[in-house]
Image (tube, grey):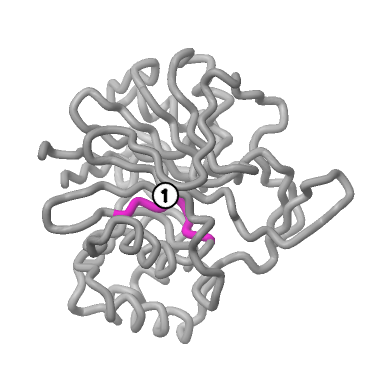
């Protein structure tokens, strides 16, 4: 089993002077010859940061979109002109019109049409490389740990309904000692994604990387989240994006038995 390399390309925070941060997320996952882009950020920051890291985006084999919000898909406007071959992996309904808690349009770019011969819709599991899978979250629970309140979708122009993020996808990396779960936002709840991954693969989730959408969670919500994570096999939490810096600090304090750290633009992680 070879090494899998992860690099944060877009995040809300950076500690480097020569790259940019934005409210968005993107990471590169590499295994052997596979180059997998997980989300694309909100703008051209992905392209600009990739140049700093000498990353040729034309070599990406697969781009996986965690869900159809523009802080994860807006970079597609700038990625697609640079890459005419990559498979585009999405959940069903990724391109439906959506609005956020402030009532503004946060949809997948309306002007973009992904060519049908490049589009791959995932309803269950899809193997991307020897050890890397993309998983649909639609079988996961919607409960106290989910972050769907206030988000809406418009499957028909004037028909508004609650957005349960049935298009949400996450990445699972199989390791000998357990699973690494990579999340874009975990709108359906990071605990619920962990449970689904363990159900699907029959192995424990030992590491979580990415956004957990806890940025606006109360102290009580963080405490309950930490209590649930503490009951599971997670040994490492690498927080990004919508986790929120303050929530990250609370999680770190309340999970003393887990390695909790924040990853920013440029960070490299090897599994």
Give the structural element (helix, strand or loop) at label 1: strand
Give the residue number, with chain letter if any, for mark 1: 170
Instruction: Out of 197 and 255, give the one closest to the viewer.
Output: 197
Q: Is residue 22 above or below residue 61?
A: below
Measured as percent of width and height from the top left, residue 196 is found at: 39, 62
Q: Which residue is drawn at 30% across and 81% down?
A: 254
Measured as percent of width and height from the top left, residue 26 is found at: 42, 40
Q: Residue at x 56, y 69 (%)?
A: 142
Q: In which quarter of the image is residue 18?
A: top left
Q: Is residue 188 above or below residue 68?
A: below
Image position of 113 (left or right of 127): right
Q: How many labels does the image show?
A: 1
Q: Which residue is drawn at 16% across and 50% down?
A: 175
Measured as percent of width and height from the top left, residue 255 is found at: 26, 78
Tell me, yes or no, whether the highlighted magenta stretch contains residue 157: no
Neighbour tally class for label 1: few under 14, some 14-19, many 20 plus, Cα within 10 Å: many
Which segment did they paint magenta?
A: 181-187
Residue 46 visible, this angle: yes
Measured as percent of width and height from the top left, residue 27 is found at: 36, 40
Image position of 262 (left or right of 82): left
Q: Quadrant of the N terminus?
A: top left
Residue 253 visible, this angle: no
Instruction: Out of 126 and 235, give the one closest to the viewer.
Output: 126
Q: Residue at x 46, y 83 (%)?
A: 219
Q: Is residue 103 above or below residue 214?
A: above
Image position of 180 (left or right of 144): left
Instruction: Out of 250 and 190, give the one closest to the viewer.
Output: 190
């Amino acid at each position: 089993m070879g090494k899998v390399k992860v690099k944060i390309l877009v995040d809300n925070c950076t500690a480097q002077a020569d790259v940019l941060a934005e409210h968005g997320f993107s990471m590169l996952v590499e295994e052997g010859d596979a180059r997998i882009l997980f989300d694309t950020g909100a703008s051209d920051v992905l392209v600009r940061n990739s140049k700093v890291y000498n990353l040729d985006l034309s070599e990406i084999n697969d781009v996986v979109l965690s869900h159809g919000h523009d802080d994860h898909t807006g970079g597609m406007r700038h990625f697609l002109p640079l890459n005419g071959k990559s498979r585009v992996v999405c959940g069903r309904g990724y391109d439906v019109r959506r609005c956020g808690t402030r009532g503004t349009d946060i949809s997948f770019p309306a002007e973009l049409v992904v060519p049908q011969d490049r589009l791959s819709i995932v309803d269950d599991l899809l193997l991307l490389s020897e050890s890397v899978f993309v998983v649909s979250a639609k079988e996961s629970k919607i409960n106290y740990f989910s972050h769907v309140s206030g988000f809406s979708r418009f499957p028909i122009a004037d028909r508004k309904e609650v957005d349960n993020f049935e298009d949400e996808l996450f990445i699972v990396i199989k390791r000998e000692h357990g699973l690494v779960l990579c999340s874009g936002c975990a709108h359906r709840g990071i605990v619920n994604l962990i449970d689904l991954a363990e159900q699907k693969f029959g192995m424990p989730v030992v590491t979580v990387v990415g956004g957990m959408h806890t940025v606006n969670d109360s102290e009580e919500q963080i405490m309950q989240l930490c209590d649930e994570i503490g009951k599971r096999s997670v040994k490492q939490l690498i927080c990004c994006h919508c986790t929120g810096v303050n929530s990250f600090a609370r999680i770190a304090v309340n999970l003393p038995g887990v390695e909790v750290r924040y990853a920013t633009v440029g960070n490299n992680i090897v599994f």
